[in-house]
Every structure is written in structure tokens, then in C-alpha cells.
Image (tube, grey):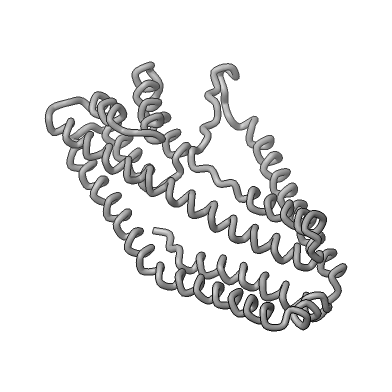
Amino acid sequence: MHPELVIFLVFVALFAGVLYALLRRRQRVLTRERLAPLVEVEDPDEVPPEARPILRRMRWLPWLIGVVAVFVMHYAVGWFWVYGLAAGLLIALLGGQLELALLERRTNRIETQLADSIDLMVGALRAGAGVLNSLDNAAQETRMPLREQLEEVVGRIRLGDNAQEVFQELTERVPLETFMLFSSALSVHWEVGGSLAPTLATVGRTIRDRIELTRRLRSMSAQSRMSILGVLFATYAIAAIMWSNDPERMERFLVSDYGSALVAGSVILQGIGIAWTSGLARIKL
């Protein structure tokens, strides 16, 4: 396959992806416009701002870095287009896995903070404190980023906002199953009353079991991830040995059409394999 054809197919795929994203955005805008007359608003100035989630993904950033890497490798380093495209795709796929790993790390951190805050609330409730005071005490003892969320909940309730809406917006800012369970428990108690300490104790124990199971799954899949890295390291080590033994023949192979296509195809398959195996090892609880 000629490098020009590969470049053309890649740009066609990128154009199709951008067009699909724009069409989806247009559909969402039309849906909001059609549903807007059905929403009764007494005063437009009193509409609260849309809740912004704190766990935001930047799926576009790795692909942007990959596109920049393609042009840098071609114009600055002097690589062929086919090698630059393969390396850019590999960088984008690996960057996507890194971005997802950082998101999972932040998710585990905030879920651990939530479990600790629930334990503090249970202790305060059993000591005779009220729900709002126990939530305020937990917020004061919690670190960022959960502290800001709990302080906003306590502050808005004390200012007179509807507690049900406040708890609902908490789940929108932190779109996790654990926060949905926590907000549901507080919302039901706020509506019907009753003893909240046993319910929160059960919620906290469930969150800790979830965190422990996630860690066990990560430790069980560590061997497969290390084996993949070992295979990749062995592949590039063999290529380096072949280059050191016969650099002229290796260079002729790399600059040929078949050689460049085979090397670029192997690099692309490596990136796809890494993303695929990472997706298989990642289990949603």
C-alpha cells in the first residue's frame, strides 16, 4: 500500500469522525430547543447554572497530541509519512490509556474520601448530632476534591435551597454509583426521616467493598499487563539487535515500500492490542 493512499484513508477517517461529532452535537441542540417550551420557568434569572462534573474526561487531548506528533516526526525529524502516522496513532492510543488511568486514580481517591466521610458522619450521628451538622463536620475533616462538594451541599441547604435538588446536583457533579447511593440515602432520610446511621454505615461498607474488589482485580491483571510490556520490549530489542548487526540491510528494508508498510502496520497493531487488552482487563463494577 502506497503511503499517499494511507494518508488519504487516515484523513478520510478523521473527517468522518469530526462530521459524526458535529451531527451528534446538532441533534442535542435541536432536542434542547424542542424541549425548552415544555419546561416551566418562573424567572429566567433564577435558573441555577448547570452542574459541572469534577470527573471530566479529555478524550480529544491524546488524539490532538498524536496529530501534532505526526507533523513533528515528518517535518522536524524527517520520518516518512507512514511512520509518522503509525507513531502518532500509537501515541494517541497510549495517551488515551494514560488519561483513563489518571481518571481511575482520581475516582478511587474521591471514593475513598467518601467512605471516610461517611464513617465520620456515622460516628457523629450516633453521638447525637444532626444530619446537617454531621455532614458539616465530615466536610471540615475531608480533603480536596470532596471537601468542596460537601461544603457546597451544606452551604446551599443552610441558605434555604431544596435539599432534594442539592443532592441531585451532587450526583450530576460527581457521576459515580457510590455518590448516587450516598445521595439517595440522604434524600430518602430527608423526606421520610428515621435512623440514618445504620443506612450510612451500610453504604460506607458497600463503598469499601467496592474499592477492595477494584484493587484485587487490578492486582490480578497486573501480570498480564507486565507480560504485554515484556513482549513489546522484546520486539524492539530484537529490532535494535538486527540494526546493530546489519544496519545497511535494515535501512534498505525500512525505506522500501513493503518494509515501511510492515513496520507501520506492526506498530499500529501494537497500539490497538494494548488498548484492547486494557479494555478487557478493566471491569466496571
Q: Residue at x 64, y 73 (%)?
A: 269
How many numbered circles does the render carry?
Answer: 0
Q: Answer left or right for 107 relative to 73.
A: left
Which residue is the extreme one toward the left?
127
Q: Residue at x 31, y 29 (%)?
A: 139
Quarter of the image that includes the N terminus: bottom right
Q: Quadrant of residue 82?
A: bottom right
Q: Answer left or right for 233 relative to 192.
A: right
In the displayed structure, 18 sits above or below 54; it is below
Which percent across, then down, holds residue 137? 25, 27
Q: Between residues 203 and 47, which one lies in front from this camera angle? A: 203
Which residue is the extreme one toward the front?
245
Quarter of the image that includes the C terminus: bottom left
In the displayed structure, 158 sits above or below 60; it is above
Q: Between residues 111 and 16, which one lies in front from this camera angle? A: 111
Q: Residue at x 23, y 28 (%)?
A: 134
Q: Do we see residue 164 in this rendering?
A: no
Q: Quadrant of residue 38?
A: top right
In the displayed structure, 154 sits above or below 106; it is above
Q: Residue at x 82, y 75 (%)?
A: 255
Q: Answer left or right for 107 relative to 8.
A: left
Which percent across, then down, holds residue 235? 59, 77
Q: Do we see residue 161 in this rendering?
A: yes
Which percent across, then down, holds residue 93? 62, 61
Which percent across, then down, holds residue 32? 65, 37
